[in-house]
Amino acid sequence: MKGKIQIGYLVSYDYELLKKSIPIIYQDADTIFFAIDKKRLTWKGDSFFIEESFFQWIDNFDIENKIVIYEEDFYVPTLTTMECEIRERKMLSEKMGIGNWLIQIDSDEYFVNFKQFVYDLREYDSYLENPEKKPVQICAFLIMLYKYTDNGILYVDKPQKAIFATNYPEYMFGRRTYGRQIYTNNIVLHESLSRTEEDLRFKLKSWGHNAEVDNGFLVKWLKVNENNYKEYRDFHYLKPKRCKKLAFFPTKTISEIIDIIREENRLNRSASLLWFKNFEQRIKFLSKKYFFGIDNKSVSD
């Protein structure tokens, strides 16, 4: 079975970043869905505004008519921000259509080689048949862009695993589902933190992780620059020690950063590591299913 490559974006206050993300994935997508709250409310209930010029940009850019605008009430005041996020992701995936590869990308995420990611997905097309009986999650590796500086951008010098695609959207936390995880050697730039101070403060109080942000994160973010970053350690916004060191790209242009990553090949994961991680995930999945009698529930590392 060869399902479609369906891509979904949760569109909110950082919608302008889509102008960098969409061109990278456009050619290899079958359909691209934009989930937008009807009342322009974040998961915390704060208002945001989308300029009409952005929709004009969509009309001009979408020459193959791949983009679908999906508007609904995604903010529910009785739910937490994470519960609102999970609800919206499920609704979006159902709109995208079970039986296809359901890829959810955030506005601030830029694939280094999306064509390769799609190629890797196709190796597992058999999982699109009866997906509820064999749910899987397809992973790539994020390079977190930490902070723009005068002459470039600081980034976390160790790729972090992230889930992007699934065949069955039984989300439990963000993009995580209960399916077995499959690792692929794909790199995605994540512009989650590299924003103005004003934009970053707004994001930290509005996104699904707002209740989990480390208390010292913003203090350190404000202090660090391209001259002193080697003097600091532990930069992750939730669990600081997950991101121990920063490095520096001498450019602010995403396309140039992508070229650097492709040329250096330094940030790619080795074939032996991927084999080991996939073997480990399969053993965990089978152990939980057969020894504990739990269906469709796998552990995550």
Image: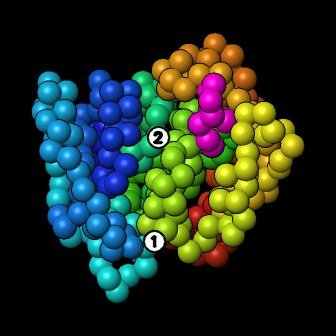
Q: Amino acid at mark 1?
A: Met
- The verdict on residue 151 being magenta is yes
- The kind of residue on which mark 2 rests is Glu
Residue 11: x and y in percent read 30, 52
x, y percentage for residue 220? 73, 55
> At 38% from the left edge and 57% from the top edge, which residue is drawn?
168
Q: Which residues are magenta?
A: 146-154
Q: Would residue 242 be visible to someone looking at this image?
A: no
Give the residue at the far right of this rendering. Answer: 231
Q: Which residue is mark 1?
A: 82
Horizontal side of residue 104 vs 153, given as left or right:
left
> Quadrant of the rendered structure where residue 118 is?
top left
Q: Residue at x 57, y 32 (%)?
A: 187
The answer to whether one can see residue 50 in this image is yes
Q: Is residue 183 left or right of residue 136?
A: right
Q: Secondary structure at mark 1?
A: helix
Q: Is residue 147 magenta?
A: yes
Residue 224 sits in quarter: top right
**Rounded to the nearest whole Å, what is the CA distance between mark 1 and mark 2?**
19 Å
Q: Residues within 10 Å of mark 1 (few under 14, many from 20)?
A: some
Residue for badge 2: 109
Q: Is residue 121 left or right of residue 157?
A: left
Kindly give the residue lying farthest to the bottom in the view shown.
78
Q: Quadrant of residue 156?
A: top right
Task: Name which of mark 1 and mark 2 comes first in the sequence.
Answer: 1
